[in-house]
Image (cartoon, rainbow, N blue to C red):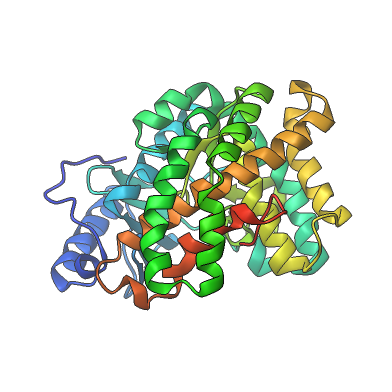
Amino acid sequence: MSKRSARSSASGVAVWTSPEWQALALAWIDGELASVDVRRTGEVRSRVRPWAAVLEVPTTMGPLWFKAAAETTAFEIRLYDLFSSVGSASTLVPLATNPERGWMILPDGGPSLGALFTGDRLVAALRAVLPRYGELQLALAPREDDLIAAGVADMRPGIMPRRFDEALDAVEPFIRQQGSASERDRFRAVSRMAPTIEIWSARLAALSALASLDHNDLHPWNVLASDDGDLARAVFFDWGDSVVAHPFASMLMALGFVRDHVLACPDDDPRLAGLRDAYLEPFAALAPHRELVETVELACRLGKVARALTWDRAVRSHGPDQAEEDWARAPIEALLGLADQSHLGHV
């Protein structure tokens, strides 16, 4: 993989949509592809968001994907070295990377589970792949210091009371400018939860000292299967929201998304419990099942703080017109979820 020195690490929508940047990116792509005897065969298609620019690149080896990460999420490119170091077969292997610029080229991983399946079939597919995700987290757990050194945000239990204060500070301007009367009331209630956050953090740390990579956006469109739908070769991708946390915090998004957008079911639906238990299979030797379930719930509750900060980072990377974007309200919704009875909140 190439790691050439960067001439510029500038990022953001204004940069990524400029002709100068696009010409520079295409020149890098063409050079990297030529080094592995691959060439472009047509025009690229682009999608630009505040947090990343993605180019679909048609080539002689099929579609490839170029990603330029924002400066705040360039750690994603460095993560692939860590995936490789633990021998992961559950992530894509880049064709080229430039960590300084925050650029990489990924192979096509096939269709997403969300594109292949719906309803109970989608739940069954997730049940089949979630143990592999847990195995990846276990493999990365001894590397938590390396994850932090790579630039992944620290959301481990001991630091979450401080992160809670940071999340309140981050969300307060949105509440003041955009919040409804009901949301302002809920924000005031959440702002009084510091003692509860302290209790949750201490209890989670007492239950388990385990820390690893939390994808933080683990939903069916971020899991890819092969073209023939072979789940044994499924891979997890799009790691730009990742944090270092208790690994079980990953279930905040995974279970909450299925509950709200796939099954439209209550928290106690046995299909959600089945997904949770499938995910917990690799961790079964660590504690009794009942304790693991308690740990999932605590990790998810604290994960709402991390989710709010991750969304705030993405929104702030957009610039002065952020309030016009649909996702500008996401930090509010994530943090106010702390007041919900459900450990999953709403995603």
Tell me if residue 181 comes above or below residue 120 in the rendering: below
**Rendered location of residue 243, percent (x, y):** 47, 41
Tell me the residue at 51%/57% (across/down). 188
The foreground one among 138 and 334 is 334
Instruction: Judge from the rendering whether residue 326 lies leftward or rightward of residue 333; answer left or right.
Output: left
Q: What is the x, y in percent for residue 43?
A: 31, 75
In this rendered view, identify the residue nearer to me: 287 or 126.
287
Q: Position of residue 229 (x, y in %)?
A: 70, 59
Q: Quadrant of the N terminus?
A: top left
The residue sitting at the right extreme is 270
Q: Is residue 56 visible?
A: no
**Residue at 40% over, 59% down:** 172
The picture quadrant where one finds residue 290 is top right
Asked if 238 appears above or below 201 in the picture, the reply is below
Decide which of 118, 241 is in the foreground and name it: 241
Q: Identify the image quadrant of residue 326.
A: bottom left
Q: Quadrant of residue 336?
A: bottom right
Q: Establish if 258 lies above or below 280.
A: below
In what quadrant of the picture does the C terminus appear?
A: bottom right
Q: Is residue 310 visible?
A: yes
Residue 327 image offset from top left, x and y in percent: 45, 69
Residue found 38% across the figure and 47% down from its top = 95
